[in-house]
Amino acid sequence: MDASANEIPFRFVAKTSDVEPGKNRCFQVEDRNVLLIHLPNGTFRAVENQCSHEKKPLEGGRVRNGKIVCPHHGANFDLQTGKAMSAPAVLPIHVYPVKVEGDEVMVQLVDPPKKPKNPFAIPGVTGF
Amino acid sequence: MVAVVRVKESTGTPAGKSPEPKLGAELIPKHRYVSDEFMKLEWERMWTKVWLIGCREEEIPEVGDYVTTEIGTESLLIVRGEDGVPRTFYNVCNHRGNQVKFDSCGNARTLQCAYHFWEYDLTGRLVNVPDEEDFAQGCPRDQLSLKAIRTETWGGFVWYNLNPDCEPLADYLGIVPEHLGPYHFEDMAMVMNVTVNWECNWKTSVDAFNEVYHVQCIHPELLYDNDDVDVQIDLYERHNRYLVPFHTYSPRLGEELDEVPEIIASKMVAIGMNPDDFKGRVSEARRAIQVYKRENQERLGIDYSELNDDQLTDDYHYFIFPNLTLNTFADRMMMFRQRPHESDPNRMYYDVWVFMRVKQGQPRPPLPDHEHVNHGERSLGLVLDQDSVNLPHVQRGMNSSAFEGLWISHQERRIRHMHKTLMDYINGVYANDA
């Protein structure tokens, strides 16, 4: 995370009791759809509520071993890093830094990295 | 949605639909992908009988420039001679069997083995043996010169054939020079040269690019740029192609799109069009791009005069048996070369070569360094990364006792056609072609 990300304020998303342990739920925060995941061990994760494969919502996907399973085509994502752990997804999902203060869950609305407009683009090759 | 309009006739590359051969609907047995025995048959009856690409001519522009390339258990040495002609040799010194060159490319005045300095000229003839008088049996040049391999050139590529009695390259290529000549591959410059170790059979990789059935599943982004349904498939004698309309959208998306997708807009911007100036329907964007490219070819620095309008946008996607996939566009080409592993049917080498047409008045860009990586170590861009993610799992699945073979659909029939050609080689149909 770069220095400017540290200056982005944490925003309130929900009360800890709004999402049961083991469940996840989407909240609108400003213009973002933030999926809040309450892990069985009591910690929270927050990701953009969009699968990187077909851009469908991840909300309601099963959470196992720190990974969320897309309810549409079964792609797995690591909830800490966002990394795609299984087909059909290749790209990561966007992860929001999260913290809990008292009974409030807060996230930093950092911008997702820009995706290439041209899916054929190859790192290191211009013009393809 | 407006159906994709195709050119009916073309003075250069034929555009029309070819007659469909009858290929049946049988299961393609899985042993062709996993068995050591079949791998040996492929080597003996196919790989050692077909024309294969060894390198680009631009990789060996000067006298004495050489590259080494591997196919199966063989290492080959391709070198440009004093007469300007590229020649291919088995890369082995006839003294003790050392490889004459270990590196992937270089320049040499003579080809000298690094072990005892036996020396061959650029035609492969043995010209110097240190302490030659010490060999009681002598060193007969005819017997000990480098063993030459049939070599020809087409399209800026150096081709070789391990069969000394093979047919000429032009006969082997068949329709290819007529179809792909108008793209002038010889005027394209290589801008990427990557080899990836893949844990799958070479055909598992070939198959992945010979059907668009998978696009809706693993490339959802491409539905906003490609029509993956209205794809013309042409199966020729040994080679085949499909024509995929680009800069339109998939009928699978249903109704006409409201706005030009970002991917098509980015393609407009790349050639100097302002997407905001385009007022037509999204299904008309492909045609608008074709017209714009034709009208602006001088400014774009590329002579499109030998290409039809569809070729200005679409992927004329060719498969040259057994192991070349060409995503061919008017100003660029992405080629895949699949090579078998030397001993394991479950592994292969995937070469990705990208070429750009050199714009008029512009210098050729420098050759890229060759990168050789393991699967996953280097991104090849989103689309190729998506293509590759399933393949090791396909290969493992094919090894399951529960799997009998490939259950192929009509839209996947290029795979069936490739297998027909492969089995024709296995069964000796092409054995007496020379």
Image (spheres, rainbow, N blue to C red):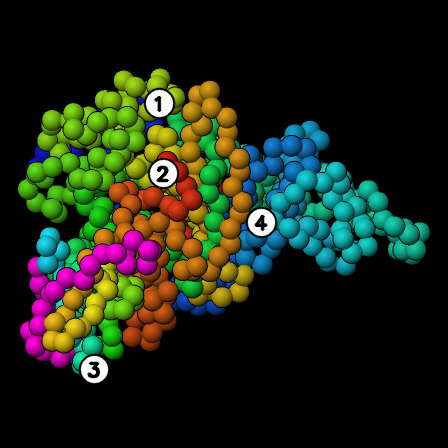
State the CA–CA distance, disc 4 to disc 2: 26 Å
The image quadrant that residue B333 belongs to is top left
At label 4, the amino acid type is Thr
Residue corresponding to mark 1: B300
Alpha carbons under labels 2 and 3: distance apart: 47 Å
Q: Residue at x 38, y 23 (%)?
A: B302
Amino acid of disc 3: Asn
* Magenta highlight on residue B294: no
Question: 10 Å neighbourhood of mark 1: few (<14), some, or many (≥20)?
Answer: some
Q: CA gap, disc 1 to disc 2?
A: 15 Å
Horizontally, residue B154 falls left or right of residue A6, namely: right
Chain under disc 2: A
Question: Which label lies toward us, 2 or 3?
Answer: 3
Q: Chain of mark 4?
A: B
Q: Quadrant of the N terminus of chain B?
A: top left
Say if B56 sits above or below A77 in the image: above
Q: Which residue is mark 4?
A: B69
Label 2: how many residues lie within 10 Å, few (<14), some (14-19) or many (20+)? some
On whether disc 1 and disc 4 are found on a single subunit, the reply is yes
What residue does disc 2 label? A128
